[in-house]
Image (spheres, rainbow, N blue to C red):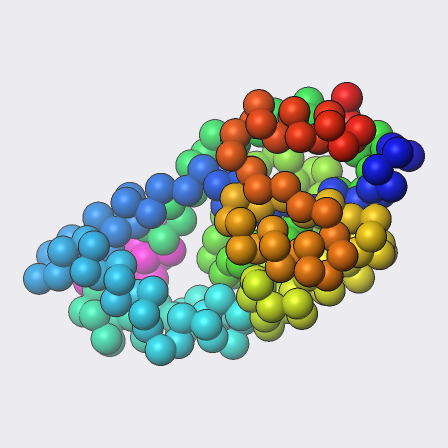
Amino acid sequence: MAGSGIRTIIFDIGRVLVRVDVGRAKAGLAKGLSLSPEELWSAIERDPRWSDWQEGRMSPRDWYLNLSSRLGIALDFEQFAAVWNSTLDPEPILPISLFESLSKHHRLGLLSNTDPIHVAKLESTYEFFRFFPAAVRTYSCAVGASKPSPIIYQAALKACKTRAQEALYIDDILAYVKAARRLGMQGIQFQSPEQLRAELQALGVGH
């Protein structure tokens, strides 16, 4: 084990493992509407049931029906799901070799604010999921809580069977890294693959 005492490395997904381009979904959902793509996406993020959607209290079809009735989105459910998933870039950010190296000496886990439509697409698309067994994938839509709530971090620690003091959390959003640190975890704010490798090396993790 590394001198840092880190046994477990927990990754965020969006903008850490997978590139996210919300612009594609904005454009696709706004087709035929009087709202601009920006206005439409703002309305979606401010939807009264956004938290219910992100935290698993709505089914994908109910979320679709909610948005369709409120905003007039003229897509059937399958079209809606495809456009919703168009935010996910098929090319991952980090190389498989990194997970191969890290998994030799550390348990790996996932912790993400995400929804069931994205989960299904993510898990069926990206090769890196083979390094993250289902038991260590912690999603807001499954836990019923979102970052930065301590509840979801505690769920991830439990899923990974690790103590906070033995865990490292990696996220692109500094507020979410700070939330992990408040629980006793170490944290890295992801900015680039090169920066992540350098910070991991400084902690004595991986290579």
Q: Give the image location of residue 49, x and y in percent.
A: 39, 76
Rendered view: 50 above or below 102:
below
Q: Is residue 134 visible?
A: no
Rendered view: 158 above or below 92:
below
Instruction: Please give the name of the residue rendered at 84% of the width and 56% of the height, measured from the top-left corner.
Output: 163
Q: Give the image location of residue 89, x and y in percent.
A: 42, 36
Residue 153 within the segment the image draws in magenta: no
| Left or right: 107 as drawn, with respect to 74 | right
Question: On the image, which quarter does residue 71 sit in?
Answer: bottom left
Q: Is residue 51 visible?
A: yes
Instruction: Please give the name of the residue rendered at 63% of the width and 41% of the height, measured from the top-left corner.
Output: 188
Q: Give the image location of residue 160, x and y in percent.
A: 80, 53
> How many marks do you count on the picture?
0
Task: Give the magenta-colored segment's residue range.
Answer: 74-82
Quick one: which residue is furthest to the left in this view? Answer: 34
Rendered view: 67 above or below 103:
below
Question: On the image, which quarter does residue 112 sit in?
Answer: bottom right
Rendered view: 203 above or below 59:
above
Instruction: Please give the name of the residue rendered at 65% of the width and 26% of the height, measured from the top-left corner.
Output: 197
Dominant secondary structure, magenta = helix
Quadrant containing the N terminus is: top right
